[in-house]
Each structure stands twice: as structure tokens, then as C-alpha cells.
Amino acid sequence: MVDLHAHTTASDGSLRPAELVALAVKQGLSGLGVTDHDTTAGVPEAAAAAAAAGIDLAAGVELNVDHPAKLHLLGYFIRHNDPALNHRLEELRTFRETRNDRIVEKMQSIGLPVTLEDVKAEAGGPVIGRPHMALALLKKGVVSSTQEAFDRYLADGALCHVPKEKLGQEEAMRLVRGAGGVPVVAHPKSLKLEGDELEAELRRLKDLGLGGVECYYSQHTPEFEAEMLSISARLGLIPTGGSDFHGLTKPDIEVGYGRGDLKVHPRLLDPLKTIAAGR
């Protein structure tokens, strides 16, 4: 099996890229997608480790895209050093640093005993985000789980939330395509649409440049998985799949196996490779 959706310490995961590859090998995977949020910084280390271990690496990224609901766009087999992509991602990271300061200030303003230094200590790397804030709140005993931290303080609309700068839909598609990659909608349930409305939305996104949709995912029911496979076939979108592994902030999700029953066949890599190689 393969896992095409996993995160490292380059964004909000708890394992370094090489450690993630080692875990994938231990889990018996033949392929891995490294898809950190708004950064490709973990790809070189992961690629070197994957080459040494003899498993396929799908160099990727996960972009937060402006949408009435929630749209995350995965880019697969990108050129991780693409100048246009990385310039835009650097702008997003600069905004995120300011946003992190504002979130911590909000937490402190309501009496939560968390400092930016506490959050950085949980990150294990240069990039920090809300999952690290959740871990800091958990360590301080403010909450009993990272999910509670998000629900009460960090999720969109929660008490300490600060809006995030997002890419436009066409811009995100253009950046991924321009870097030689294939744009794929991550966890399509986040679009909060069903049936014909979901299919219509994916068709609209395909017209903007979408190439695939994440049909296999840790939180999908068998029924929703079957629906997504049917929609992807009708629309000519490539089906992909992954666990969305993060490590400590999502302790119930295993790399390669999600919550225990995820199975993503290695044949799903072939069409992604074919499209990327043709550019």
C-alpha cells in the first residue's frame, strides 16, 4: 500500500521527514506523499531518505485555498524548488508568523498560560501552527485533548481564532500546475456538499485546473468513498488517497492505515506520475 497524504516537522507534523519515511518503511508501504502545509521544505530530506530506502516519494504540498467552506489543495510530483511556488509560499509563511503572534496574544488575553516560546517548543522545527498551540495547551493542562483545544480555542470561529490568508482558487491551481504538479482536492468532505452539489463543485474546480480528488481518506465512510470514486470516474479526475498523518496532534491516525482500515493501492501513483512526467 501507499500513503499520499502525510505531514512532517516542516509544517505541523511531529516527525522529521527522514523519520516519516522510516516509519512508512516500517509500516510496509511502497510509496509516500509528503504534503506539508504551504511549504516544500521537507521534500529534499524525505526524497533522500526515500531513495535510500527504495520507496516511491510523491513530492507534494498542501495549500489552504479560499472557499466558502474549506478547500485544501494537494499538489503532487511538484518541483519543490519552483521559484514562483516558493515565492508565494514564503509570503504566506510571513503572514502566518504574524498570525501566530496574534493567536497567542488572544489566548493570553483570556488568561491561558501559553507563551510563543511554549508553542515553539512543541513544533520541533522552524514552522509553527495551531496544532503546536493545541499541544502547548494540552501540556499546560488547559485541555484534555488537542481536539478540545481546537474546539474551544483554535478552530475557525473559536474564541482565539485569527483568520488565515488563503490562496485564490485559480492562483492555487496555477501554482501547482506551474511547478509541474497535479492539483488534487484533499478530504472533499470539507467542502460540506453532498450528491449532485458536490459533483457540480468538483466539475467547476476541474474547469479551473483540478486534476484529482482524494477518494480514500481516514475519515471517509465506505459509502462516501464509493461515492467519490464514482464521481471521480464520471468527471475524469484521478482518485488519490492518504491518511493525513501528523503524529502527536492526530494520535489516532497511523501512517499508511489511517484509523486501521485505510488501503491506498500503489497503482494510484501511476496516473499522477504520467501527468507530471508529461509536463
Image (cartoon, rainbow, N blue to C red):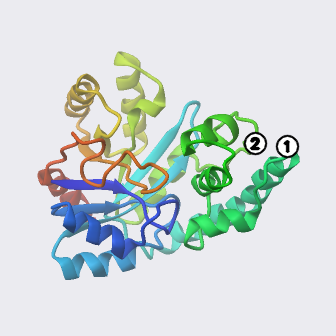
User: Dots 2 and 1: beta carbons under 8 Å?
Assistant: yes
The three-letter amino acid code for the residue at tag 1 is Ile
Which element type, helix, strand or loop, lies under badge 1?
loop
Residue at x 50% of width, y 58% of height: 37
Q: Position of residue 268 (x, y in %)?
A: 17, 50
Q: Which mark is residue 110?
A: 1
Residue at x 47% of width, y 61% of height: 13
Report the front residue among 134 and 278: 134
Report the front residue among 117 and 43: 117
Which element type, helix, strand or loop, lies under badge 2?
loop
Give the number of the mark in front: 2 or 1. 1
Q: Residues within 10 Å of mark 1 (few under 14, many from 20)?
A: few
Of the two numbered discs 2 and 1 on the same chain, state the one appearing first in sequence.
1
Q: Which mark is residue 40?
A: none
Residue at x 18% of width, y 70% of height: 55
Residue at x 41% of width, y 66% of height: 179
Q: Quadrant of the C terminus?
A: bottom left
Q: Position of residue 106 (x, y in %)?
A: 82, 48
Q: Which mark is residue 160?
A: 2
Query: Is residue 172 found left or right of 186 in the rendered image?
Result: right
Query: Is residue 201 found left or right of 87 in the rendered image?
Result: left
